[in-house]
Image (cartoon, grey):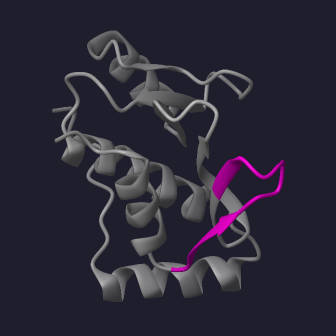
Amino acid sequence: LAMDIIEFREYCLSLPDAEETLPFDDSTLVYKVGGRMFAMLMLERPDHFVVKCDPERAIILRDRYPQITAAWHMNKRHWNDVRFEGMLSDEAMRREVRHSYMLVVKQNVTPKALREEILAHIATEGVVDDAERFD
């Protein structure tokens, strides 16, 4: 069975210090760490989710997987739409969520003290960004 919105939500919330918010409306779930968005799911379009991605990695993924495209209504250089249906494994989808989460912690969470506190928590939980993999 392919990952679905319930499993996606549970995985996002399993990451250290992650929270679910509704900043835009009642049907757009936004997952944040340190107050910064790392994933989004629109209940009106439950066939995909949005995650942040290193721009060079994003190009490779979009070329390799038809279910990964530039995110609609987001900065297309930094955000990907990932459809649940397709050839991407559940583990590969979880890897993209982890990559987004770690990217946001390292690049967007401020102040530095909060970023370091979250990184220390991540280390104790054993969460790793294995984004060098593309399978």
Residue 22 colored magenta? Answer: yes
Specify start and end residues of the magenta stretch as a single range: 17-30
Q: Looking at the image, which is closer to me, 69 or 117? A: 69
Q: Looking at the image, which is closer to me, 2 or 103? A: 2
Quarter occupied by residue 3: top left
113 w.r.t. 30: above or below: below
Residue 58 colored magenta? Answer: no
Q: Looking at the image, which is closer to me, 87 or 122? A: 87
For the image, the number of numbered tags is 0
Q: Position of residue 88 (x, y in %)?
A: 23, 30
- Toward the right, the furthest residue is 24
19 w.r.t. 60: above or below: below
Q: Where is residue 124 in the image (x, y as percent from the top left)?
A: 33, 89
| Residue at 30 percent of width and 26 percent of height | 85
Q: Where is residue 6 in the image (x, y as percent from the top left)?
A: 41, 56
Q: Position of residue 96 (x, y in %)?
A: 37, 44
Q: Say if residue 108 shows up in the picture.
A: no
Q: Say if residue 48 shows up in the picture.
A: yes
The image quadrant where one finds the N terminus is: top left
| Residue at 46 percent of width and 30 percent of height | 47
Report the side of 29 relative to 50 (left or right): right
| Residue at 76 percent of width and 59 percent of height | 22
The image quadrant where one finds the C terminus is: top left
Quarter occupied by residue 34: bottom right
Q: Looking at the image, which is closer to me, 60 or 65? A: 65
| Residue at 38 percent of width and 63 percent of height | 11
Report the side of 119 relative to 31 (left or right): left
